[in-house]
Amino acid sequence: MSLEEFTSTVDGSEVTVAQGTTAAQLYVERREVVVARINGELKDLATVIQPGDSVEAVTIDSPDGLNVLRHSAAHVMAQAVQQLRPDAKLGIGPYIKDGFYFDFDVEEPFTPEDLKQLEKMMLKIVNQNQKFERQVVDPDEARQAMADEPYKLELIELAGGPGSGADAAEGASVEVGAGEMTLYNNVDRKSEDVVWKDLCRGPHLPNTKLISNAFALTRSAAAYWRGNENNKQLQRIYGTAWPTKEDLKAYQERLAEAERRDHRKLGAELDLFSFPDELGSGLPVFHPKGGIIKREMEDYVRTRHIEEGFQYVGTPHISKDGLFHTSGHLPYYADTMFPALKVDEEYDDEGNVTKPGQEYRLKAMNCPMHNLIFRSRGRSYRELPMRLFEFGHVYRYEKSGVVHGLTRVRGFAQDDSHSYVTKEQAPAEVKHLLDFILGLLKDFGMDDFYLELSTRDPESDKFIGTDEQWEEATKVLETVAQETGLELVPDPGGAAYYGPKISVQARDAIGRTWQMSTVQYDFNQPARFGLEYQAADGTRQEPVMIHAAKFGSIERFLGVLVEHYAGAFPAWLAPEQVRLVPVAEAFNDYMADVADQLRRRGVRVQLDDSSDRFPKKIRNASKDKVPYTLIAGGEDVEAGAVSFRFRDGSTDNGIPVAEAVERIVGAIERREN
RNA sequence: GCCCCCGUAGCUCAGUGGUAGAGCGCCAUCUUGGUAAGAUGGAGGUCACGGGAUCGAUUCCCGUCGGGGGCUCCA
């Protein structure tokens, strides 16, 4: 080993390298290596290896490699945008799941035609095989280089100030590194000119060629600068990028499949529910078939609640608004409650008010009313835990832009409960509730979810109660949540004003997550309502209340279920459980008898005695996603049997009718599928 | 709430400055024998609603309502 050589660790092996060797030279044979992880940090391939460095290859199809690919694609897009719209000012442009975006301040929003044109311009840049070149700069040089980019200048100032740039804005850490400041220059191969540059921490692909033609611009939308609605709206373009054209096609196929599962689409196709314009935005109606699913859900959940020690109660949809001042909701959440209804106001002939009216509010939550039930008479510690439960219909004035199918509506039913417990009973009750919830989710076949722990933001004045109260409540929830062994994601600042929350977050077909079940620890409302019970020692004590919604919202849960099963519900939930298809008209009567036998056992069954021919009837049963299709022709009739056809197309022929009935009834009772 | 896009038959969608079309579905008749589309015929639309410019609007402009994609929000 000469003086100009030293050893480094390359992909786990000791290797002798010459001074000045770059990572690119180490991987010159491996075109799929796009960046290197040097001593644990992602670096450009142009990075020079130092003595003792530990170097690992990062390939374009690895998670880190894909992120770099997408980040570089974002740069290429931004370059194209500034060619198309020279006045476009750059916002931030990070990679995201499956793709990237870049924000621009432009005079005119982008049109779909613009996106097509930008894709073409990007392809040109890709084919020019520009080099990505890293340049370390000091803040003054950065300011000079970004003199025409006001948003970048803002980021430079934020990075220069106290703390790092990492927290300046969502994605801003991609722009401005915590340590040294860097520019990335796009360099033309032939002229060696810098054709475009951006303030960016990197790393990037060595060249644009690696992006190939496996990218697409997917949509444009507005987004507030630095995620704050008081800031200017920039125009954001989303794109996706993959190592190969095949990967891109597979991704697009996944999106198309997700679209087919969309509950809004399936809800119409399967005749489950609709959103009549006449009712207003976010107000669904359930059709007979959707009504069956909803009722099965409710029946099951009601039964389970009673088994778990809950008492079924009932409360009205509206109340005088004073109640929500007492609870603390109106001062904090007036914006998300429907405006007041004024009643009983009286006037004289001149129109002057002679008797002031009374304001009523549609309720946005059930807890205040349950509190009144608790308070309706004196309570003993012997009654605790006291668990009140109902399907409470609540109405929330959701902003027009956020209403979405069944998953974000303005009127919905919560399977809402409030457990009133002593402070000492609280941990066990939280555990009881969480176990109950996880059991229910399992019964409904839900498995794609994680837990979230929402806590208060100590900086915000939205949250009421003392530090000690918050600490204790949070500790209880956190401990119980951790004991489940499920993934637990922190959600700082996401708590309700009255206490912290554990929630179950489920993913829909399009990958959006929705809050389903919640367990909330509340030490505020009992005080506000003056709730108390008499303890064993004769003193009056304040209970703790624990809010819990198991489905969350029946509507949202149903929507997520539709997508989870892609409309092919397990038999116990399916609106139509059995479709009977005679091979020919001559067997209609035989099938009618089978239908009777099933119906007598409580099975939801439909005989297809239409004038369609046999194959069409099979097709219809299949399209309707009925769990069991029973078929009978001459052979079956002679044997006193029927033939099964399942949703996957498989069959089981010649099953005696009595056995077929038992099989179906058994599967429904066991909630199979 | 903000930005952009969209609204034609029950559904999916063509189309046009001179009051409209397809496929599926629906209805009728003829059909009906083994696992995803039998044939023929028919009905069905104030082209979301309101206003404006035009000789004339479903088409162009404005507003309202509703939907979609994001952003912000989500007790």
Image (cartoon, coloured by chain):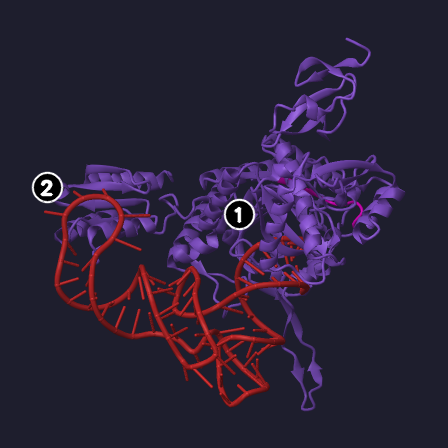
Chain colours: A purple, B red
Q: Residues within 10 Å of mark 1 (few under 14, many from 20)?
A: some
What residue does disc 2 label? A638
What residue does disc 1 label? A510
A453 magenta-colored? yes
Q: Is residue A470 visible?
A: no
Task: Locate residue A443, reporting x and y percent.
Answer: 45, 39
SS for dot 1: loop
Q: Which residues are magenta?
A: A452-460
Lateral position of residue A183 relative to residue B6, left or right? right
How far apart, in angstroms, are the residues tagged by discs 2 and 1?
A: 49 Å
Q: Is residue A644 visible?
A: yes
Task: Locate residue A134, reporting x and y percent.
Answer: 77, 36
Q: Which residue appears farthest toward the front when viewing the image? A: A190
The answer to whether dots 2 and 1 both sit on one chain is: yes
Lateral position of residue A668 relative to residue A593, left or right? right
Q: In the picture shown, does residue A524 fall above or below B63?
A: above
| Residue A517 image-quadrant placement | top right
Q: Nearer the viewer, residue A538 or A496?
A: A496
| Residue A202 image-quadrant placement | top right
